[in-house]
Amino acid sequence: MSTIQNILKDTRAHLDKALEAAKHEFTTVRSGKANPTMLDTVRVEMYGSHMTMNQVANVSSPEPRLLIVTPFDKGQVKAVEKAIRESDLGLDPAIQGAIIRIPLPAMNEQRRKDLVKVVHKLAEEARVGIRHWRTEARDRFKKLEGVSEDDVKHAEKDLQKLHDDFIAKIDGLVKAKEAEIMEV
């Protein structure tokens, strides 16, 4: 049976997942230095399906401005290189034998501003997810039987506080990532 506490607990779990997803998304946005997770959003077409980069290759960052991609299947180097080149990351990969070297260009002011916009878009998606779970919980509160209106009102206040806390965490992540990107 659903109780106010169970609903709040479920909602907190979903909000935690939304926050973790946002954190992960932010790591894929490039800041000043190379990070192997930058390529997590790149989808490679191999064997008739689209796969994530970590399913088809090993990505490492031996230097602050260099990524090395080593495809698991050496015959698919061209497919991996093409996927990186066509991604919206603005990278220029170069094939060297069985590996792909990706030098990261120094970012200009416009590129930094564009990346900040991407971060804001990702943050808004996370906020929408958080709002969705708040609405979901409110609907569940209304369906509870044998619970007084006052209890529901108190639960909605607790829910709103939970919502506000998570929105503030997202805003904090955005500020930190924005500072990281704009750092020259």
Image (cartoon, rainbow, N blue to C red):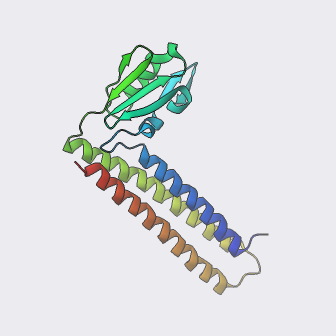
Callout count: 0
Q: Residue furthest right?
A: 1
Percent x, y of residue 169: 45, 64
Q: Is residue 150 above or below residue 27?
A: below
Q: Residue at x 49, y 26 (%)?
A: 44
Q: Observer-nearest residue: 61 or 84?
A: 61
Percent x, y of residue 141: 66, 73
Left or right of 97: which side holds 103?
A: left
Q: Residue at x 43, y 61 (%)?
A: 170
Q: Observer-nearest residue: 143 or 30?
A: 30
Q: Residue at x 43, y 35 (%)?
A: 39
Q: Residue furthest left?
A: 109
Q: Residue at x 52, y 54 (%)?
A: 20
Q: Is residue 137 above or below residue 20?
A: below
Q: Residue furthest front?
A: 62
Q: Quadrant of the N terminus?
A: bottom right
Q: Is residue 66 above or below residue 127?
A: above
Percent x, y of residue 129: 52, 57
Percent x, y of residue 172: 39, 63
